[in-house]
Image (spheres, rainbow, N blue to C red):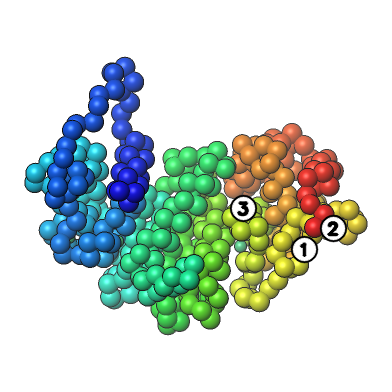
Amino acid sequence: MPKLTAALLALAALSSAHAPSHQDEPAKPPPFVRCIPCKNEGRLPCAAHPKEEMHFEDGVQMCSLVAGCATCNGTGWLDCADCENPRWGDALATKRAQQAGLKTYTSRFDDEMKRPLRKIVTPHIMLVWELDELKIDKRTVRHHELMHIYAERLEKLFVDYTTVMGTGARDFKDRMTVFVWSKEADQMEGSTRFTGQSNQRGVKLLGATSAYSVLGTKQNFRDDTALHRNLVHNVTHLILSHQAPSQWLGNIKHGWVDEGLAHWFEERYWGLCDNYCYEEQNSNVDFKGGKWKPVVRRMVAENDLAPMAEVLQKNTDGLSLPMHALAFSYVDYLLATDAAKFNELCKLLRKRVETRDALAKALGTNVLELEQRWKAWVLATYPVR
Ligand SMILES: [Zn+2]
Ligand SMILES: [Zn+2]
Ligand SMILES: [Zn+2]
Ligand SMILES: [Zn+2]
């Protein structure tokens, strides 16, 4: 029963984060149960929803497609009357207890748009999802599964970010809110309401309140991968700017960190960077096909590049295309050599410490020395092609 095993493992992972440790007690064998109706899960899918979709609910805190159901209290599952499985029971009880608060938290989005939206909440992401379907690996995935896939992808990005940067959930006061619309009129209205600006493609609000609103249709993104990568790039901006102390770096002359880290996560998952933050959000921008390591290596080898001292003075919208690639590579170097120090540097910059002082304090270096070390590292580690 691989599906059941996977679900049990997923729940074990979720619940172990909060479970008190009992290291002093000898491990007790799990209670022996053999319950036909629930296949030993101790729970049954709520009959008000498609049975095969209820496993989606295990990975999230709230899903608007089941949240209104009084029978299962918005969890998609009911306790089995014939047996008990403490793992599922505890998780379901926790989830039931969270529903009222999460419904209040998410209802303001419905109120603003004056209609019920599809919404999904994970520990660090609130996603409004209005796309009806999308092809993933040649399979047409319908909206319910699709919104769960995207919510889990973004939650995974958050966890990856905090792991890479060596930070923790305590540095984040609020969830990152993300809106993926299917109609241009909704993107225009939603971006105005939730980010304070509007355009037909994508708009971010950065800092203490962080939100990204995007029109997720074919006119902007050719496929699932393109949309996924765009969300990874932009949600990285949200996470970086929201991390304590909250501050957007892109308009206080540290665009290199802002764009560099967002590109770094694109490169980490796809080996490819093709999202650029410009005023115009031009969708046809490309720099050397987006595979930047050999490109940067050549720039360094041929000494055909802007000095680091110049790049470290630019706002995000002042970075040229080659500077985007350099910014990616600076971040790549700093994460590879000492991620904790890079995280410290980002914190100092968000506190508005001057670049020169922040480099001295976090890295014990200056721009010229840093540039020499970075160049040597690029030549030693990046591929020629
Ligand atoms: Zn759901
Ligand atoms: Zn139900
Ligand atoms: Zn049972
Ligand atoms: Zn960007």
State the image coordinates of residue 307 (x, y, percent, origin top left): 84, 54
Left or right, 87 with respect to 287, comes to left
Q: Residue furthest right?
A: 302
Q: Amino acid at mark 3?
A: Arg
Asked which secondary structure carries label 2, the reply is helix
Q: Dot 1: what SS?
A: helix
Residue located 79% across and 52% down the image: 383
- Give the answer, above or below, for where 44 lies relative to 199: above
For label 2, being within 8 Å of ligand 4 is answered no
286 lies left or right of 126: right
Q: Residues within 10 Å of mark 1 (few under 14, many from 20)?
A: some
Q: Which residue is mark 2?
A: 299
Front one among 126 and 193 = 126
Would residue 324 be found to the left or right of residue 127 on screen?
right
Residue depicted at 48% across the width and 65% down the height: 212
Tell me the amino acid under the disc marked 1. Answer: Pro
Query: Which residue matches tag 1?
Result: 322
